[in-house]
Image (cartoon, rainbow, N blue to C red):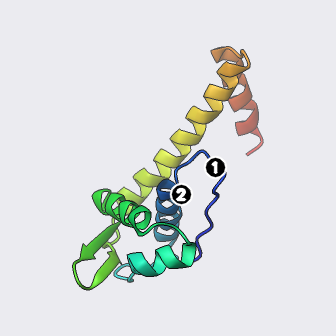
């Protein structure tokens, strides 16, 4: 598993870690029932606190992406296609929300934002 964290990002480290693990699971880079690195191993590799890794793993478990078996490790949960699709959709919605916030910040109206989206969609 290849994780790249940005210490200067406004996104908390545990969220960056979660997002990258989710992407690996959704894309198939991490297979069902595959074991993730231990909290200590990953924290050492990434040079971050074990508590940060634990928080990311706990949140991933809450969202159904991984399952932790005490004493054995954390494993990729059984693939749930609906969950994976929802995660992809949420990512796109978050990106749109961010873009709309930027557009509002520079004074664009809803109609202007919609026109930009229509132009971009025509290119695809």
The percent position of residue 101, horizontal first and vertical second, equals: 62, 27
Q: Along the polypeptide, which appears first: circle 2 or circle 1? A: 1
- Badge 1 crowding class, 10 Å Cα cut-off, few under 14, some 14 to 19, many 20 or more, is few
**Which residue in the protein does label 2 denote?**
16
Q: Residue 19 at what x, y percent from top left?
A: 50, 58
Q: Are marks 2 and 1 in contact (CB under 8 Å)?
A: yes
Q: Secondary structure at mark 1?
A: loop
- Give the residue displayed 77% in from the left and 42% down from the top: 123
Residue tagged 1: 9
Q: How many marks?
A: 2
User: Above or below — where is 3 with respect to 113?
Assistant: below
Q: Name the residue at 48% across, 77% down.
A: 42
In front of the other: 3 or 32: 3
Q: Is residue 44 above or below residue 120?
A: below
| Residue toward you, 6 or 98 | 6
Image quarter of residue 122: top right
Could one spot residue 49 in this view of the protein?
yes
Q: Mark on residue 80?
A: none
| Foreground tag (2 vs 1) | 1
Q: Nearer the viewer, residue 20 or 87?
A: 20
């Amino acid at each position: 598993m290849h994780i790249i964290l940005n210490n200067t990002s406004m996104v908390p480290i545990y969220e960056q870690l979660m997002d990258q693990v989710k992407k690996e699971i959704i894309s198939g880079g991490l297979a069902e029932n595959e074991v993730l690195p231990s909290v200590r191993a990953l924290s050492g590799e990434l040079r971050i606190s074990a508590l940060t890794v634990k928080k990311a793993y706990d949140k991933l478990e809450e969202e159904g992406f991984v399952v932790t078996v005490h004493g054995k490790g954390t494993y990729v949960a059984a693939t749930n296609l609906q969950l994976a699709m929802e995660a992809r959709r949420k990512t796109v919605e978050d990106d749109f929300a961010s873009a709309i916030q930027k557009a509002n910040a520079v004074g664009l109206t809803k109609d202007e934002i919609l026109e930009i989206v229509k132009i971009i969609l025509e290119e695809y």
